Image (cartoon, rainbow, N blue to C red):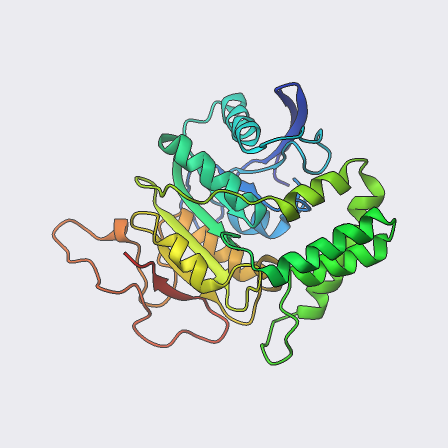
Amino acid sequence: MPEEIIRSLTVDGLRYAYRVQRRVPAADGAPATEPVLVIGGALQGMFGWPQMDDHLGPVADVITADLPGMGTADPLPPGPGAPVLRAAVTGILDDLGITRINLFGFSYGASIAFGCAQHDPGRIARLVLGGVPTHIGEDRRDYWHRATRALAEGDAEGFATLAADGLMCLDPARPVHRRELARRYVRRSFLHALAHSGHAADSLRRALGDRPDFSGGLSGVPALVFAGEHDTVTSPELQREFAGTIEGSLFLTLPESDHWVVLERSDEVAALVTRFFTDQPLGPGARLPHQVRAGEAAPAESTPASPPHPGSPTPRPAPR
């Protein structure tokens, strides 16, 4: 069994915690890489990423966290939370004595991860961002306004249903793998959080209502951005535009999935993240820019040389 460590820290007087699963090298000698820190959405605390543990465990120490406002941590105070969350991430690295990490941020966690990379790029070896909520349409906001009204009226069931539906593609003409399973899971997760955390409601309101800042661009950090092809929170086209603000980044979509691609395509996402963090090709014919050898011409397009097998990601270069 891999060694697991859980430690508590404070930032600006707020209690939070992180968990480390120590690397267990694979028998086949899989390549090692820098530790990986995983930052998810408001409901994805330190124990919510078993697929990442499984895939990344042979190649890296895996770090997950209940940052302030998430899981068992103290709630964030009123006002901007980004500086506190960045400081909390830095506190984890300093506590572990880590110089550089691989950083994965999903949904709400993507804004935290992107902000960390912008403010301290020298500590980020590689960056993966998924389900990036750069622009949220009014139709989605309408779901969440109705959900928060239901919560204010004491209707937890109505809140959970509206909040879950607002994060998913429910159009039957657009196929989503394991849609109903993911929908039930998300809805139950909202209800569980409301029942077991005294500040869950405030945390969920912040996560659903915040307008995170994805401006300013980024350079000097190898980066991958991915989206579910039917993401209705922020369209893949808009996420691709965001990827274009990161110098040298790659962008890809995963088929038959929506904003909850990490649930609907959990193994594919974990395998993708593992390949990127260990400098392996992402799929048939796809290579990362920093993998090109000296004197070798970089490929004009990071697209498959042949059609990918069903269910595999489709790499697309971010626009320049």
Looking at the image, the residue that sits furthest to the top is: 13
Look at the image and tell me in which quarter the C terminus lies: bottom left
Above-or-below relation of 174 to 30? below
> Residue 104 at what x, y percent from top left?
49, 45
Residue 175 sits in quarter: bottom right
Looking at the image, the residue that sits furthest to the bottom is: 173
Towards the viewer: 139 or 89 = 139
Look at the image and tell me in which quarter the N terminus lies: top right
Residue 121 sits in quarter: top left
Can residue 57 be seen from the camera position used here? no
Q: Give the total of numbered labels.
A: 0
Can residue 49 be seen from the camera position used here? yes
Q: Is residue 168 left or right of residue 190?
A: left
Tell me what residue is drawn at x 75 percent, y 55 percent.
147
Towards the viewer: 293 or 317 = 317
Tell me what residue is drawn at x 64 percent, y 21 percent.
10
> Residue 258 at what x, y percent from top left?
58, 65
Above-or-below relation of 192 to 83? below
Looking at the image, the residue that sits furthest to the left is: 295
Towards the viewer: 116 or 213 = 213
> Residue 47 at what x, y percent from top left?
68, 43
> Residue 319 at what x, y percent from top left?
31, 59
Tell me what residue is drawn at x 55 percent, y 72 percent.
256
